[in-house]
Amino acid sequence: MNQIGGLTMLNEMIKEYVKLTTSLNESKEKADQFNKEMFKTDIKDRLANKDDWEKQLDKLACMEKAVKYKQEYLYILQYNIFNTFIVENMEAIREIINKYAEKPIGEKRKSNLYDELYSLIPKEFSYTIGVHVIYRTFGGIEIYLDYKNNKHWVWIINSDSNTYSELTEEKAAEIINNANRKIVNDIDKYIADTYEKVAILNQKIEEAEKLYSEIRDAASEINLWSCDTIIKKYRI
């Protein structure tokens, strides 16, 4: 399912999310069951038939890798759904917010505003996508929607007039552009690139660990403990 990003409607992405969630749960159950069956065998039988045991270990590793891949795919799909939700619902969000423009800020209006914005969220994500209408520490109110700390700031109101302000077309366009930039258009490539970056990072960490070990050993030979202390500060 390449090119999912902004080229697929939100409803289609949600259908894909539901299917993927079901598939992921099934894969987890199969891997768990296979793991339990494997380790029911006696240790003596495993040692007696090493080739068969290694094949089972390889099969389990493949099953666990599939679970990991689907989980990562699901996370990115959720992230895409959130950003696509912002893009596709910005007009409705703006309409709701602007109903309150120039009206006094108060708890009742704040509650109504929250309820109206929350009603836009698809039921599959009602516990995942957050709506926040909160008073700011230094006055005014801020409104934002978020998914796992990925926030889209919709509206910040100053306390000067103590009234709600309009969400302008320019600000709405800025929010849409911001959301569009965050959409991952090719999930398979994104995951492959991430794996490659992690592999490179791990290699660099190993090189740094080896270098640190060599420096520490050299410092120990001349009893230069202060050098060892300094090096530790820069360790990854």
Image: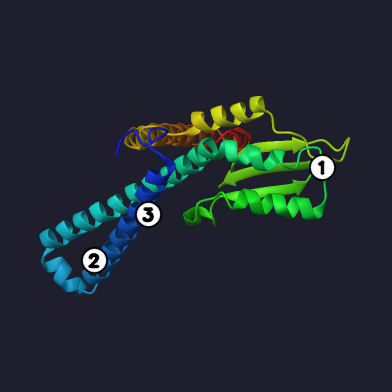
Q: Residue at x 62, y 40 (%)?
A: 93
Residue picked out by circle 2: 34
Tell me: 141 left or right of 129.
right
Who comes first in sequence, dot 2 or dot 3?
3
Q: Residue at x 45, y 40 (%)?
A: 80
Give, as a three-letter code, the residue at label 1. Lys
Q: Position of residue 203 (x, y in %)?
A: 38, 33
Give, as a three-letter code, the residue at label 3. Val
Tell which of 66 and 107 is nearer to you.
Answer: 107
Tell which of 85 and 212 is nearer to you.
Answer: 85
SS of the residue under disc 2? helix
- Give the label, 2 or 3, closer to the camera: 3
What is the C-alpha distance between the residues marked 1 and 2? 61 Å
Residue picked out by circle 3: 18
Tell which of 1 and 236 is nearer to you.
Answer: 1
Residue picked out by circle 1: 103
Who comes first in sequence, dot 1 or dot 2?
2
Q: Position of residue 214 (x, y in %)?
A: 45, 33
Who comes first in sequence, dot 3 or dot 1?
3
Q: Is residue 15 visible?
A: yes
Tell me: 27 left or right of 106.
left
Quadrant assignment, res 151:
top right
Answer whether labels 2 and 3 touch (C-beta < 8 Å): no
- Give the label, 1 or 2, closer to the camera: 1
Tell me: 154 left or right of 29.
right
Tell which of 59 and 185 is nearer to you.
Answer: 185
SS of the residue under disc 3? helix
Q: Position of residue 99 (x, y in %)?
A: 72, 41
